[in-house]
Structures are given as C-alpha cells and as structure tokens.
Image: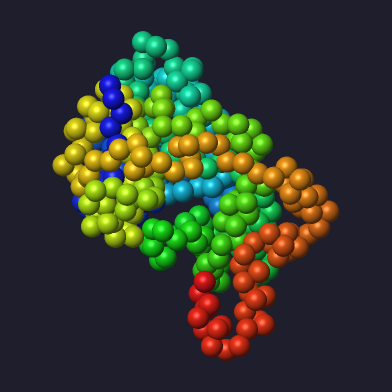
C-alpha cells in the first residue's frame, strides 16, 4: 500500500495532556487492550536511572509507556521478545513500540506464521545516548541539591508545553526544572557512534506505524489551525494491517492528512552527524574532569547563567526564564 501520513491529536484532552505528543499511542493501545483483549509492549522507567521494555494487558501499566525516555531501553529486562512470541503463540494480539532498530530486531526473531497478530510501532529517534551519562548526571544533581531524585520527566509537556524540552527532576525536597541533560543529548557527543550510520533515517519503515512529534505543522494545509502547543502526533501508516487498525480508532482522534514533504524532519532524512574532533575532546573532558566541569562547558543553561551575571537589570528581565 502507499504510505498514509497524518497529523493527529486525541479527542480526550486529558489523554493528550498525559501523552508526549498527540496521544496516538494511547488510541492504538486502548483498542488493542479493550477491543482485542491483547498485549502492549513498550518502554518504561524502572526507577529513575534505567529504562526497560515490558509487556502488559492493563491500561494502568500501559500508561507507564507514555512519554519520552532519552536513554537506551533494556529489552532483555523481562525477556521481552520471548514473552511476545509466547503471547503470539497463544493467539493473542500484541502491539510493540520501540525505536526502529528495536522493531527490526523483533521482526527478525518472530516466526513469519505468528506475525499476523503482531503490530509494530517505531518511534522517531534522534539517537541513543549513553546510559552512563544519564546515571552520572543524576548522581551529580543529587549531590548538587543534597536530595535523592525520586521521579523524572525527560520532557515536561504539562508544565512547559509541547514545543519545549525541559526536564523535571522530583526530589525528596522539591522539584527542579532544567535543560542540562537535554543540552548534552542535543550535542550528539553522548550518543552511540553507530547511530550516526543508522539505516532507518528514511520515510520507508517496516513497522505498521511510525510515530513522533509533528514538527513543521504550519506546512500542512489547515495545520496552523490544527496546532495548539498541546501536542500533535506525526503518524506514518506503513502497512495494510496498520491501515486497518487506524480505521478502527479514527473516531477517537482528530486528524488531517499530510504528505511526505510536509512531515520531513531530521529523523526521517538522515542520521545525526557530529564533529569527530569535538566528540573526542568531549569524552576526554568527561573522563578527566568532574561532571560539574562538563555541565558548565557543554550546556547552555550554565552559559546563559554566566551571561546574565554580566547584563544590566533590564536585559536580565528580558532573558529571564530562557
């Protein structure tokens, strides 16, 4: 089939507010759970330092799969792929969501005769960063504020809006909002080098659905009216099976059609790139200096803070919060 492309937002505002983008993942998985009596497999945080993949047949547990996690997920944590195969052998419908490479890995091990009951959703992915940096960041921050971190949100949409990328860290004392880790991640230096050669940075995917944030919505006819900074999902429907499922959940969402030119963004065009010399310097600094030095040198939060110290009062007010 020809790929279908949509901008989508869930009709239920509460669901959309709890979702990273427009709520398409919840719409798809609600149908799998409620109408098909199936299983959903996705990524959740196990504590605050580790991301894992798990399977569930309840909405309560499924809700843990919502939201962005900018660290690598452990697929072996609960024998994820083996469990999926067992569910499929029992005749259950299963929806798996993960990065493109994770979806390809799953499709490579599931026997062909079981794939009719398997739905796959790949998440648009910039790159996969080092889990060590995330762990070191949390350790550094806990020492900085003298409190234990008990919950995290990599992109706090409810407080800062869909277009913003502010992480929130809840501690035993208070909640902190910043962009330290976001800035390190955005540089690309903390990501796996193999991600710079990712073969899935294209509009052609083997999954049933490809989903992500719909950046550049103003390129779509009626896109400006459709957007509201509460979250819009980009959805590529890649297969006939995906199209059949999408038709079954259409009443739960609002959507407008788009084309390939409308939806192009970095993760659909080419792998991320980085300057080898600068990346080498970063890791040299990382292993030879403390984490505070890395934060001050490589994140804009600290750079902006230093600039504000030198500005007259009226300019400080204009920059406040940026």
Question: Furthest residue to the right?
Answer: 288
How many numbered discs, if any?
0
- Residue closer to the observer: 106 or 286: 286
- Residue closer to the observer: 293 or 322: 322
Residue lying at 56% horizontally and 71% vertically, measured from the top left? 173
> x and y percent of residue 53 in the render?
49, 36
Residue 184, above or below 130:
below
Q: Quadrant of residue 141?
A: bottom right
- Residue closer to the observer: 172 or 294: 294
Q: Which image quadrant: the N terminus?
A: top left
Question: Furthest residue to the bottom?
Answer: 313
Position of 224 with respect to 271 (left or right) is left
Position of 152 with respect to 279 (left or right) is left
Q: Colour scheme of this structure image?
A: rainbow
Residue lying at 22% horizontally and 44% vertically, measured from the top left? 256
Question: Furthest residue to the left?
Answer: 251
Instruction: Residue 274: tell me if it is visible.
Output: yes
Q: Quadrant of residue 248?
A: top left
Residue 264, above or below 299:
above
Residue 4, above or below 224:
above
Instruction: Residue 63: tell me if it is visible.
Output: no
> x and y percent of residue 27 in the render?
27, 42
> x and y percent of residue 227 in the render?
28, 56
Residue lying at 83% horizontally and 53% vertically, measured from the top left? 288
Q: Quadrant of residue 122?
A: top left
Residue lying at 57% horizontally and 89% vertically, measured from the top left? 313
> x and y percent of residue 133 in the render?
67, 50
Residue 122, above or below 138:
above
């Amino acid at each position: 089939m020809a790929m279908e492309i949509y901008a989508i937002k869930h009709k239920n505002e509460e669901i959309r507010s709890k979702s990273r983008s427009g709520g398409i993942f919840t719409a798809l998985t609600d149908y799998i759970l409620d109408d098909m009596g199936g299983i959903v497999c996705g990524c959740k945080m196990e504590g605050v330092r580790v991301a894992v993949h798990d399977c569930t047949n309840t909405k309560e547990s499924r809700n843990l799969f919502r939201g962005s996690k900018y660290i690598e997920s452990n697929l072996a944590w609960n024998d994820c792929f083996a469990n999926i195969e067992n569910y499929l052998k029992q005749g259950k419908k299963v929806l798996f969501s993960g990065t493109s490479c994770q979806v390809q890995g799953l499709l490579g091990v599931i026997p062909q005769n079981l794939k009719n009951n398997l739905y796959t959703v790949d998440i648009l992915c910039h790159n996969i960063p080092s889990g060590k940096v995330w762990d070191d960041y949390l350790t550094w921050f806990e020492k900085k504020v003298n409190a234990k971190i008990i919950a995290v949100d990599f992109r706090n949409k409810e407080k800062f809006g869909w277009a913003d990328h502010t992480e929130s860290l809840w501690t035993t004392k208070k909640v902190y909002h910043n962009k330290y880790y976001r800035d390190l991640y955005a540089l690309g230096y903390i990501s796996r080098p193999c991600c710079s050669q990712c073969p899935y940075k294209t509009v052609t995917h083997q999954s049933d659905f490809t989903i992500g944030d719909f950046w550049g919505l103003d390129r779509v006819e009626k896109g400006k009216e459709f957007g509201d900074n509460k979250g819009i999902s980009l959805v590529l429907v890649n297969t006939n099976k995906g199209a059949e499922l999408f038709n079954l959940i259409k009443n739960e969402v609002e959507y407008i059609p788009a084309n390939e030119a409308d939806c192009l963004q970095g993760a659909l065009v080419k792998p991320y790139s980085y300057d080898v010399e600068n990346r080498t310097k970063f890791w040299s600094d990382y292993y030879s200096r403390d984490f505070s030095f890395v934060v001050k040198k490589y994140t804009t939060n600290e750079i902006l803070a230093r600039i504000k110290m030198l500005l007259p009062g009226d300019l400080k007010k204009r920059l406040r919060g940026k």
